[in-house]
Amino acid sequence: MTERLPSAAAPVVSVEDLTIRFTGERTVHAVNNVSLSLGQGEVLGLLGESGSGKSVTMRALMRLLPRKKAQISGRVSVAGQDVLALSDTALSDFRGKVVSMIFQEPALALDPVYTIGDQIAESVMRHEGKSRTEGMARALEMLDLVRIPSAKRRLAAYPHEMSGGMRQRAMIALALACKPKVLLADEPTTALDATVQIQILLLLRELQREMGMSVIFVTHDIGVAIEICDRVAVMYAGQIVETGSLADIVRRPIHPYPRGLLAATVHGAKRGARLETIPGTPPSLDVAPVNCSFSPRCASVQPRCREALPPRIDLGPGRFSRCILAEQSVPEPA
Ligand SMILES: Nc1ncnc2c1ncn2[C@@H]1O[C@H](COP(=O)(O)OP(=O)(O)OP(=O)(O)O)[C@@H](O)[C@H]1O
Ligand SMILES: [Mg+2]
């Protein structure tokens, strides 16, 4: 594991105080004051258990949330564009060209009635104004790049004619066809068996390096984050509770939630050790948080954790924690 300092250049993705509430029969406070940034060529892991708001955050970066139901506030900037203010026309240029997403379930991204070749070619024709012949040539190049065997023949295949692993590769090919600056990978390997999963992870990491792309990689598996991420942001109940370099989060986590996640996972030094689970369950998202959302499950809880929202404690470049335990770790001013 190598420590990488955050890039000094302006971040490619910058999210400030993003808050998303779904209204309807039930109100869901899905994302609460999320701030994150992603540097050029960096891979950020977004980690957290089911329902913590990972997918909703990713969808907000592409403005893929239901317009009427989702109330969004805060600032989202991707490659210098103010995403929450983009017009519909600007949005269709933005998606696929500036930022692309790979989903957990390829069925969400691949259209069952078009061949893989047609879908990739169409995206290249739309975003880059290329001819169909050029689009098909790019499609073939992309299928080769993601190592789909007999790529030429596969251009004419429909999604249902491919295995799960091949469909996932085809979705990656489609997402990367127009060389986006930012790739959002939302649990892209969870549905696959372990061997295929590792092949796809390695492929993504290789493509990211080759293309110099910036990636946000969503996962609930800390072992997967360790394999491919430079930095990690840990979400709990719609908030980022801690963020830092991979080494910071894996070796020196402060917030008891990431500490608990690590204790509950088989990884490196933990191999062979007894696994501990975090007692309790995540809170309801019916109301906006008024205190530390993790406090009912926290072994280190103090009275003030229940009285107010924990402040965001900055611990150096690219590293913060929303836990009062971090107060003892604040670096001395230089
Ligand atoms: N369109 C929607 N309408 C209402 N509530 C929603 C909608 N989309 C998501 N939610 C709610 O927002 C919360 C966060 O969901 P999200 O899908 O972001 O979780 P997640 O962290 O991606 O979980 P998982 O690991 O299971 O994918 C959940 O309570 C979910 O039910
Ligand atoms: Mg999700």
Image (cartoon, rainbow, N blue to C red):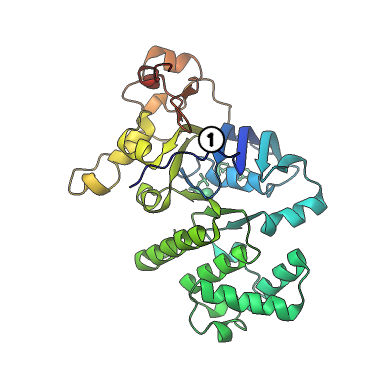
Vertical position of residue 171 compared to residue 180: above or below: below
- In this view of the protein, can residue 22 be seen by the observer? no
Q: Dot 1: within a 10 Å radius of its alpha carbon, few (fewer than 14), some, or many (20 or more) residues?
A: many
Classify the position of the C terminus by image quarter. top left
Expressed as whole percent of the image width and height from the top left, the position of residue 106 reads 56, 65
Q: Is residue 85 left or right of residue 265?
A: right
- In this view of the protein, can residue 108 be seen by the observer? yes
Vertical position of residue 55 compared to residue 116: above or below: above
Identify which residue, 312 or 279, lies in the foreground.
312
Instruction: Give residue 122's quadrant in the image.
Output: bottom right
| Residue at mark 1: C-beta within 8 A of ligand 1 | yes
Q: Residue at x 21, y 49 (%)?
A: 271
Q: Residue at x 44, y 41 (%)?
A: 232
Vertical position of residue 248 compared to residue 215: above or below: above
Identify which residue, 49 or 329, lies in the foreground.
329
**Residue position marked by numbered label 1 in the rendering:** 238
Q: Residue at x 40, y 66 (%)?
A: 199
- What amino acid does circle 1 point to? Gly
Expressed as whole percent of the image width and height from the top left, the position of residue 316 reads 45, 27
Instruction: Give residue 258's quadrant in the image.
Output: top left
Q: Residue at x 39, y 20 (%)?
A: 331
Vertical position of residue 125 compared to residue 270: above or below: below
Q: Secondary structure at mark 1?
A: loop
